[in-house]
Image (tube, rainbow, N blue to C red):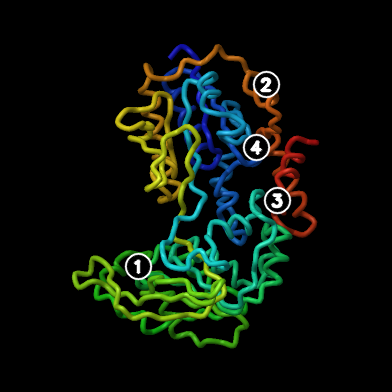
Amino acid sequence: MSETLRIAVVGAGPAGIYAADILKKEVAARGGDVLIDLFEHLPAPYGLVRYGVAPDHPRITGIIRALREVLESGVVRLFGNVRFGEDIVLDDLQRHYHGVIFATGATKDAPLDIPGIDLPGSYGAADVVSWYDGHPDVPREWPLEAKEIAVIGNGNVALDVARVLVKHPEDLLPTEVPPNVYEGLKASPVTDVHVFGRRGPLGVKFTPLELRELGELRDVDMIVHDEDFGVDPNEERQKQNKQILVISRTLEQWRTREVRQASRRLHLHFWSKPDAVLGDGRVEALRVERTRPTDDGTGLEGTGELREFPVQAVYRAVGYFSSPVPGVPFDELRGVIPNEAGRVMDGHRPLPGVYATGWIKRGPVGLIGHTKSDAKETIEQLLADDNSRWEPQPYEADAVPALLAERGVAWTDIAGWIRLDEHEMGLGEPEGRARIKVVPRDEMIRVSRGE
């Protein structure tokens, strides 16, 4: 591998940064050299680690440390605040790199096809997560006018949303919650948040830690219903899984715990499949159908019993969905870039020089560990494709910065991210907080660029 390999990575979340790290190590192991440019549409890196974790969940410090080490390794350049498809396009990358890895993730909500889901007052969980995490591209205000709220889903995102909405905002103040989010939550009249899952209490997708945290909320009663327990004949077998056993014990404690006179309540409803969002002009209720295990115990079926819950807002947390990448094939049904082991496919043939990793490659499932193995598979394909890479122009270190400058793009770099990071920590220090996140995009750019 005599010529220095030049690769562009689009997306500077964990998937993109891990891909850069693995590529750097694999090329070095083969005695070669590599230059990697990361392009990110936000002014700051880290993707959902920064903008997908609730503010009262400390970021996974070990992961952030590892990601930062890659960025500061000297092999990677970061071009933040660069929109692929607008500020830079596929033809530009072909002129300057041997290939590109798309790691654009999944940030939209998966659809939920039930009547009334588009009524005013019905929202996707991804949108409210972006709001309370201070994402620069969502409105500063969020409509928090409902006393009773429904959250559809039984994964960690559903519990995060329910917890943030029901939690007393004063208890968020020690976190990095942005000031506009704190003020919005403080004005919320919420008294009851209902979480609905179509499976039973042992078929949930959230973790024991997420569940336990709900029981520790100040002045919030946890409410579960006896009728939801003992329905599944396979419960004892399911409890052989240690995580499920811990979840079972936590829920059983709540069944026997006395409901206090808290000012807010969080209700967990199982065996409840959303049937319709009801309302005349805006959300007034959620209708669910009770479910039960099939006779063979392998699936679910509806019972035909319908129930209505008066709510004034509905949040669906049924998964994430990826957005198309300009100029690249996209599977609208699955929400992924079609690929084979990371090689992007145009019909039945590989698209030379184009690869994918992370959620845009396999869909929005799996944890950080999957992201690493995913990236390794993609890098193996890229390095095997010696004869089908792009043939770029001779390397000039200033070529891409000059191209962006010519187009009037105010990009941010690694030094700029360090500057913004230190600025946010400095904002939090007088208040005893780890950081106060800068929310407006123009302010993030100004601080990053030292303007």
- Quarter occupied by residue 261: bottom right
For badge 2, the amino acid type reads Ala
N-terminal label among 2 and 4 = 4
Looking at the image, is mark 3 or mark 1 earlier in the sequence? 1
Label whose residue precedes the other's in the sequence (1 or 2): 1
Residue 402 is tagged as 2
The three-letter amino acid code for the residue at tag 4 is: Asn
How many marks the image carries: the answer is 4
Q: Is residue 220 visible?
A: no
Label 3 neighbour load within 10 Å: few <14, some 14-19, many 20+: some
Of 337 and 247, nearer the camera is 337
The quarter of the picture where the N terminus appears is top left
Residue highlighted by disc 1: 203
Sequence-earlier tag: 2 or 3:
2
Q: For the residues carrying marks 4 and 1, which lies nearer the camera in this image?
A: 4
**Do the residues under discs 3 and 4 have CB atoms within 8 angstroms?**
no
Task: Name the mark nearer the viewer: 3 or 1.
Answer: 3
Q: Residue at x 48, y 47 (%)?
A: 106
Residue that carries the numbered disc 4 in the rendered image = 81
Tag 3 residue? 439
Relative to 62, say whether 239 is above or below.
Answer: below
The Cα–Cα distance between marks 2 and 3, rounded to whole angstroms, is 28 Å
Type of amino acid at the residue the image marks with label 1? Gly
Badge 2: few (under 14), some or many (20 or more) residues near its Cα, within 10 Å?
A: few
Residues at marks 2 and 4, CA–CA distance in whole angstroms: 15 Å
Measured Cα–Cα span from mark 1 to mark 2: 54 Å
